[in-house]
Image (spheres, coloured by chain):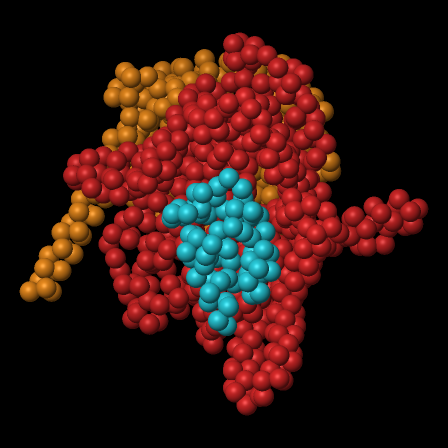
Chain colours: A red, B cyan, C orange
Amino acid sequence: MGYTSFAYLGLLAASFFFYMILPLKHRWKVLLLFSYAFYFLNSGKYIVFILLSTVSIYLTGLMLNKIDDGFAVAKKGIPKENKKEYKAVIAWQKKFVCVLAVLFNLGILVFLKYFNFLGGSVNGLLKLLHLSPSVPVLNLMLPLGISFYTMSAISYVVDVYRGKYRATDQLGKVALFLVFFPHIVEGPIGRFDLLADQLYEGHKFNYNNMMLGLQLIFWGLFKKFVLADRANMLVTTVFKNYMEYDGIYVVVAMLLYTLLLYAEFSGCMDIVMGSAQMFGITMSKNFERPFISKTVSEFWRRWHMTLGSWFRDYVFYSVSLSKTFMKFSKKIKEKLSPFLGSMIPAAVAMFAVWFSTGIWHGASWKYVAYGLYYYVIMLIGMLIEPATVKVCEKIHLNRKSVGYRLFQLVRTFILVNIGMLMFRADTFSSFMHMLGSMFTGFSFAPVADGSIFEIGCDIKDFAVLIIGALILLAVGLYEEKGHSVRETVARQNIVVRWICYYALIFIVLIFGAYGRGYQAAGFIYAQF
Amino acid sequence: MEELLEIMHEVKPGVTFEGDSDLIGHGLLDSIAIVTLVGELCDAFDIEISPVDVVPENFKTVEAIYALITRLQED
Amino acid sequence: MEEKKNRKITIIRLIKVIVFLAGFVGLSVIVSYMLTPKSSHPESGISYPSARGFYGEPENTIDIVVLGNSCAYSGFSPMELWNKFGFVSYVASEGNQNLGESICIFDEVLKHQKPKLLIIDVDCFWQTKNEISRIEYSLKAYLYRWFPMFKYHDRWKTTTMEELFADKQYNYRTTTKGQFLSRDTKAAEKAFVMEKTDEVEEVPKSSVVFMNILLKKCEENGIEVLLIDIPANHSWNYAKHNGVEEFAKENGLHFIDFSLVTDEKYAINWEKDTRDGGRHLNSYGARKVTRYLGEFIKENYPIEDKRGDEAYSQWDEDYKEYKAFMKKGRKNVKK
């Protein structure tokens, strides 16, 4: 049941109705009930895993609170000289509880998502050593959204452990925070301090919120139906039969896949955020015009932002700010050089981030390679940064000039597209094959003789895709300047406004690639 | 304050931090620079900066970083 | 004071929402008209033009209409029925037709024809995988009927400026009368034999609801209803047979299950009478089904033999084409 199905829209409408007719303080129960219903309809008995996670982090939170409270009381009665010792014991206790909870939640995810991958890798290794494979292959199904809610669950436990906020004693709040139906399928990955109170407190019916939410939902449907599902036709053909295509076919498929993934994922986020806004709930942004990035690290700060910030806060900082790591970095600084002293620790911490980012996307070596691809690019960028600065100064190249910025944009765009190619290709070797075949057979003949228009998208489909992409670009640039399209439209008089609304709705209904003759792209991130 | 600026210039030479209202948003401090900076600050001021303190609000301006240091020294 | 103001705002907003939705419906009707094919010829982009060939027949000439899914248009032959019995029939079946769609196309038929007998292939009672999707698809059929825009939205690619506002002219006629002619022969892996059981797989609730709508329509128009099941080895079984048997009894209808016909003259030969390994009959299988059916109709329903009637001379011409086609003989296909 994806976000574009009638079933989801029906569920949204029903939950909205009941939410608004109940007294304020009971409204969160409607959300919780409908969220569990949605979850159960999708995953059936696998609902038990999210319940386990919910209870485990709830209890962990309470336990951490208790330890903190005990410390606060005991602190006063302890002589100063023993304080440090006592503090260390408390710190150890807290760490133990926190690590246990993280391992438990991570363990469920790793077992369900990575068991067969790890088992396969072990078996492969055994084979190399001429031993018989011994790890069985299990038939495991992934519970809906497990990759997303596990991240939220861990962030809650770690935040409480770090003392960012106190754990809640309301089970319902934790439960709703994890299972809230708009964000359960594809995120955005929620943070307890930003989201939980909003979900829990009742919001009054607000006409403007409802209208703005609906507009955002339709904007998301536009991206999904008109662009993603249309591009999907050509993309599927080429990636499925990649041996038969080379040159411009692969280039076009790669570009369209980038468009597809962006339109699909950000469109889904628009539907999610629009749905939440109808209830008066604001969710974290997941996209901020990623394709105007000047570097790939900027790209990752603008693309799937909640994932990036999660890895930054809970992997990068956890690793690089740990005491052992600090000591290690100091040693390098003293023994080797200050430059390496800051480089090597960063490189190690970043490796942890990008390895996990890669494998988070899927249990295969291809996704590991996908993560490391970005790691290597960023690392090279960091290493040659001092040299580039020098070279630019020597040849009097202004790094802030329009020309240089354009170069950076194009460079980043190409690198990202190659990343997307790897992301979509079936295996790493098919990615290598496609990457190579782009250059070996390149010519514009397929465009000139029209054969490019015969593998899924005809010339009219291309027209829609190009116009649609230009609309996305225009909206993006307008918003980058700090304006909001929805607010600008809202300021117009009623005739202009309604024309805009009707136009959007009918564009989706007429130019959407749905119904007979179309195969929808599916929600890609829902598989993770 | 002087000492702080000195350290910051060591970490990122050739950058003017003073007066900037959003060091992170403007890309003057990325997460790697922050980690290096945190390491230096811990040494120089004998404080412990934990991941909870590493949030954009605390590293937005030179003044914010200074405030963070003062707060941690008092703890 | 404050409250009064708020109430006023609420009322204004409510009116705005209603006017907006009304505007949406109005525009949908206009856009729907624009995008609907204005001709019923295959190249117009209309869905299942052969099922809609009854528009091309003179008004009120067709006595028997067959509804159902692909099993029905593969396994029933109007031309055979005409030649042997002189009954005038049409197959308005569509691929994967569900009962919602059956009702919609039957309404189209009723606007143009006055049938006396409706034959339904019950395979479509179990169309699609579960009850939810059956309801969803049937409701979709109604949506398509009131707002064809949702079905034909893709026609922005092929339509022309003149066509957008042109009048509808549906006059395509086909000499197959809706049958899907096929000489292809691909044997089933093994003969399909239904194992007798007392188990009953009840007709799905949603199908009962839609059938009742259809039955009521027939009653109002004085049309008799006959249930049949044309053999298909992948979807049919004895429990379903029992379910339909019960349904037929409750509603006082005849039900012929062709999978249980054993008379050598009419029984399906699973090596020769199917075009795709048993999922659908070919036109030789259809010939057997139709001949049996013809005898049954002759005995049970007051349908006139129109052979020799001047008004139907065209049907004799059409039959020649059918005969020529069948004469060419089987075409064996491997895969």
Q: Which residue is painted at 43% across and 38% down in the image?
A: A289
Residue situated furthest front in the rendering: B2
Q: Quadrant of residue B49?
A: bottom right
Total labels: the figure holds 0
Q: Which residue is painted at 16% across and 56% down in the image?
A: C10
Q: Which residue is painted at 65% across and 69% down in the image?
A: A100
Residue situated furthest bottom in the rendering: A77
**Position of residue A114 measured from the top left corner of the image (x, y, whole percent):** 70, 53
**Position of residue B51 measured from the top left corner of the image (x, y, whole percent):** 55, 61
Residue A125 visible at all:
yes
Residue A480 or residue C322, whichever sits in front: A480
Q: Which residue is painted at 69% across and 36% down in the image?
A: A427
**Position of residue C178 measured from the top left corner of the image (x, y, whole percent):** 46, 26
Left or right, A320 with respect to C244, comes to: right
Residue A91 or residue C57, whichever sits in front: A91
**Position of residue A170 measured from the top left corner of the image (x, y, whole percent):** 45, 75
Residue A106 against residue A462 in the figure, above or below: below
Residue A304 visible at all:
no
Residue situated furthest right in the rendering: A130
Residue C4 or residue A136, whichever sits in front: C4
Left or right, C63 with respect to A329, comes to: left
